[in-house]
Amino acid sequence: MGLIINQEKTVYMYSGKDTSSRKELVIGNYTFKIADNFKYLGTMFNKMNDRTVEVNARLIMANRAYYGLQNHVKSRIISGKTKTLFYKTLIRPVLTYGAETWALSKQDEYRLSIFERKILRRIYGPLIDKGDWRIRTNQELYLLYDEKDIVKFCKLSRLRWVGHVMR
């Protein structure tokens, strides 16, 4: 066919229970190294099929997006509606890229919810209650946000993806 394999860039990954006996793969003159994890099309894969690694990578990237927009999110000139739009269009897609394939554990759901509430607390800020400033409760945040939370968003994206696969 005329295809040439780059031996330096090509690695393989074996997933399963017993990965200790796997070494380098030799095919003809080529020797390929084994990888424990790798990034493919922006998604992290690892040999144990643990999605926590991918969720952690997505949280880091979304955090970078958030801190890149921090001056806008902190601004008193920009309305809360616009800040919410920043979150929904610029930060949440970074966080949920590839979420259609995630099987989230309770710990992953908890960490995603914490991240979302951190941003919503920054957007909506504290409030004055009987003369004292206090942080908004989670219920107050989600009432103001008036959208489905990040965990429901991920689960609905999985259902949407299943519909595409079925069609």
Image (cartoon, rainbow, N blue to C red):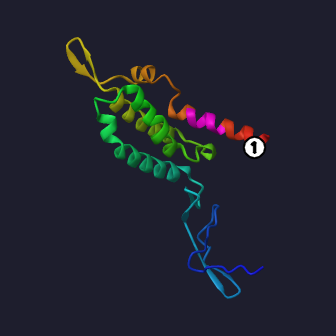
Residue at 33% across / 37% down in the picture? 72
> Where is the C terminus found, in terms of image quarters?
top right
Residue drawn at the location 53% of the way across and 27% of the way down? 148
Determine whether 29 is above or below 23 in the image.
below
In the rendered image, which residue does mark 1 sit on?
165
Vertical relation: 150 (above or below) 52: above
User: In terms of image quadrants, where is residue 73?
Assistant: top left
> What secondary structure is the magenta-colored segment mainly?
helix
The span picked out in magenta is: 153-158
Residue 89 position within the rendered picture, expressed as x and y whole percent measured from the top left: 49, 38
Q: Where residue 97 sits in the image (x, y, percent)?
A: 55, 46
Residue at horizontal 29%, vertical 35%? Answer: 74
In this picture, residue 138 sits left or right of residue 165: left
Report whether 103 appears left or right of 72.
right
Q: How many marks?
A: 1
Q: Which residue extends farthest left?
A: 131
Is the residue marked by circle 1 packed among few (<14), some (14-19), or many (20+) residues within 10 Å? few
Q: Which image quadrant: the N terminus? A: bottom right
Amino acid type assigned to the residue bearing label 1 in the image: Val
Seen from this angle, which residue lies furthest front?
A: 77
Secondary structure at badge 1 equals helix
Against 132, residue 31 (above or below) is below
Q: Nearer the viewer, residue 110 or 57?
A: 57
